[in-house]
């Protein structure tokens, strides 16, 4: 698959002019200061070959991409019991919306919107004495980079302004769907979102999903083959919030985005990938990143379909 480096060069040339179009997330003060015109992309094939372009080695705040890792870790702890507390349907609303929670009795639509990730984090708070360390260690194992950590300044910045997420957490607690104190869950959630990684490490960290649930770098089974398929199905249907239908149409592979401007994805049996550009379109996905992914599956002829 040596052709991927050439494809990435072409994508960078085409997409770089779009970097900076859109809005860098403002509601977390520490994120607002990130330079908007950065662009990086990495593809890691299952034999470990890395193809990268642009700012692929510049670490950024993974934000909601952490929801993929926290879901995987929670799933390894409680399995299908999770689905009694979180749904598996696209929400059709913004990632931080509260509107469905009342009519749906505190059961979030899916684990990739904020409310769903808060329930997933609650599972981790019950299971681990130190849920933030548990997730950081998990991501270190998946990526093979033992130096990864969360950025305390970003975590504090979000903690100070997490009014909406706190509201959701209190609301779900009133329905009995949060078992730990709201402050503990919000604290762990914000630290998870504040993990800093670059495109290469993220592409490596999602490769276990492309590899039938086995970490290709260590041979360790992370989840069963069936669970890897199911997690990937959730990425495809819910991983990019209210734009998931558009992503399936334009990109055609399972993806998970974050408001730091990163988007991870994978092609089963082949590769993990990550693109990063901080400026977002209205749905909260990286604008240049979305275009780059569309170009990637178009130029390579690779997608699920
Ligand atoms: N930390 C962010 C929040 O909770 C994550 C949102 C996102 O990346 N979509 O609002």
Image (cartoon, helix red, strand yellow):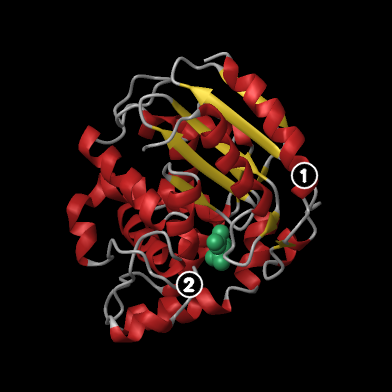
Q: Is residue 24 above or below residue 211?
A: below
Neighbor class of circle 2 (other Cα within 10 Å; few <14, some 14-19, many 20+) is: few
In contact (CB < 8 Å): disc 1 and disc 2: no
- Tag 2 or tag 1, which sits nearer the N-term? 1
Question: Could you tell me residue 85's position as x and y percent?
Answer: 25, 67
Q: Residue at x 43, y 30 (%)?
A: 207
Neighbor class of circle 1 (other Cα within 10 Å; few <14, some 14-19, many 20+) is: many
* Nearer the observer, 296 or 270: 296
Q: Residue at x 35, y 78 (%)?
A: 172
Q: Is residue 42 above or below residue 239?
A: above
Secondary structure under badge 1? loop
**Image quarter of the C terminus:** top left
Is any atom of residue 236 visible in this view?
A: yes
Which mark is in front, 1 or 2? Answer: 1
Residue 183 is marked as 2
Q: Is residue 141 above or below residue 247?
A: above
Residue 108 is marked as none
Secondary structure under badge 2? helix
Give the image quarter of residue 8. top right
Q: Residue at x 37, y 37 (%)?
A: 304
Q: Is mark 2 within 8 Å of ligand 1?
A: no
Q: Which residue is mark 1?
A: 38
Ligand 1 is found in the corner quadrant, namely bottom right
* Nearer the observer, 265 or 208: 265
Is any atom of residue 132 visible in this view?
A: no
Q: Is residue 292 above or below residue 34?
A: above
Question: Could you tell me residue 55's position as x and y percent?
Answer: 74, 35
Question: Could you tell me residue 58's position as x and y percent?
Answer: 72, 37
Give the image quarter of residue 177. bottom left
| In this picture, residue 143 sits left or right of residue 194 | left
């Amino acid at each position: 698959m040596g052709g991927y480096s050439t494809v990435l060069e072409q994508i960078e040339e085409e997409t770089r002019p779009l970097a900076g179009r859109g809005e860098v997330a403002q509601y977390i003060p520490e994120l607002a200061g990130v330079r908007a015109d950065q662009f990086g992309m990495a593809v890691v094939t299952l034999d470990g070959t890395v193809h990268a372009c642009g700012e692929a080695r510049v670490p950024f705040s993974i934000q909601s991409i952490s929801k993929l890792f926290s879901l995987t870790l929670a799933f390894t702890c409680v399995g299908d019991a999770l689905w009694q507390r979180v749904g598996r349907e696209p929400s059709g609303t913004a990632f931080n919306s509260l509107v469905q929670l009342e009519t749906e009795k505190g059961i979030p639509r899916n684990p990739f919107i904020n409310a769903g990730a808060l329930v997933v984090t609650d599972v981790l708070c019950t299971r681990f004495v130190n849920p933030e360390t548990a997730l950081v260690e998990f991501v270190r194992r998946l990526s093979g980079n033992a130096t990864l950590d969360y950025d305390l300044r970003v975590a504090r910045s979000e903690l100070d302004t997490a009014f909406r997420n706190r509201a959701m957490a209190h609301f779900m607690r009133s329905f009995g769907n949060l078992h730990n104190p709201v402050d503990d869950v919000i604290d762990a959630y914000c630290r998870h979102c504040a993990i800093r990684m670059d495109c290469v490490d993220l592409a490596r960290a999602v490769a276990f999903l492309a590899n039938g649930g086995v970490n290709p770098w260590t041979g360790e089974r992370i989840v069963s083959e069936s669970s890897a398929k199911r997690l990937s199905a959730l990425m495809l249907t819910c991983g990019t919030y209210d734009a998931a239908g558009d992503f399936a149409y334009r990109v055609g592979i399972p993806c998970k985005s974050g408001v730091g401007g990163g988007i991870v994805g994978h092609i089963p049996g082949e590769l993990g990938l990550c693109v990063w550009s901080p400026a977002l379109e209205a749905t909260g996905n990286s604008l240049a990143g979305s275009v780059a992914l569309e170009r990637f599956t178009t130029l390579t002829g690779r997608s699920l379909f």
